Amino acid sequence: MTSVRGYFHPKTATGASSLIPAPPWRYSGDLLTVEYRTDPARVRELLPEPLQLADEDPGAVALIWADWQSCGTSGDELLDPVRAQYKEAFAVVRCQYQGRTYTRCVHIWVDKDFAIARGLHQGYPKKLGSIHQTRPHPYGPAPRIEAGARFGATLAAADRRLAQAVVTLREPSATNGFVNAHPMAHHRWLPAIEKGKGLALDELIESGAASFEGGQAWVGDADLELFDAPTEELARLEIREPIAAYYRQVGVVWDGGRLLESGTSGAE
């Protein structure tokens, strides 16, 4: 009997073609985070049942740019950088489930196929995009990680610019913001293959970092703009009040999640 191997498609006799390896997945990255407040009704419309708005600061949003290097357990991808390096930009909000506060990613764009595959597994709504951010460097014209340093970031998808920001660092910070500081509450959805049968997979799951380390966080200010596009809705999370901006270098390990409930989202 023929068997096929691989954690994810495509599965083959050897498994070498699988788009992603089995967890744990390890990440090193530079994060630019811009927090602001929007109309809480715009957050609520993105929360399927049984999720509810957070009790405190329900309109808080974080738009995050991340420049990542990632790998599986072996670390082989780091020596074949095309398989390790990618960028993403994502919007997260806070929500509540059974009295506990969670973070939820409501929009996200990445620039590599393996990052999309991981997102499908984790419940992130990933799409392809074009993402760029200023990298720090100790020499030459690039900014150092220090007071007054300025970092730019842009996001585009389907040839349309969706967001741009300039972050100016002010001082070291005890935190990297509060919106993305909770476990994630995501849905894993897969439509049934038969028409009219709804969802074959409908799970509300919790996940987060199995381990985390990070450098000194810095807080500052941001000039952030969002733009309308025909097939994207990031701009619906309109900017009503800026909160703060942050920069931090981090290392994260992701190694699975936990099922909260299934079959109750009412998604279509």
Image (tube, grey):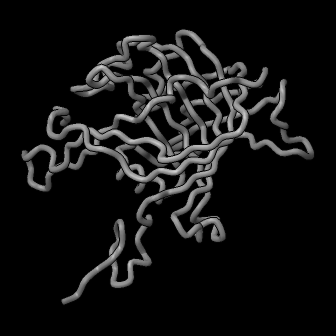
Of residue 183 and residue 91, the one placed in the foreground of this image is 183
Q: Residue at x 38, y 23 (%)?
A: 101
Q: Position of residue 69 (x, y in %)?
A: 62, 55
Q: Is residue 39 visible?
A: no
Q: Position of residue 26 (x, y in %)?
A: 54, 55
Q: Is residue 240 above or below residue 115?
A: above
Judge from the rendering whether residue 170 lies leftward or rightward of residue 262; answer left or right: right
Q: Position of residue 246 (x, y in %)?
A: 67, 27
Residue most extreme to the right: 140
Q: Position of residue 169 (x, y in %)?
A: 77, 25
Q: Residue at x 26, y 43 (%)?
A: 259
Judge from the rendering whether residue 91 lies leftward or rightward of residue 146; answer left or right: left
Q: Residue at x 54, y 51 (%)?
A: 111
In the rendered image, which quarter contains the C terminus? Answer: top left
When asked about the image quadrant of residue 177, the answer is: top right
Q: Residue at x 43, y 53 (%)?
A: 255
Residue most extreme to the bottom: 1
Of residue 186 and residue 195, the one placed in the foreground of this image is 186
Q: Is residue 195 visible?
A: yes
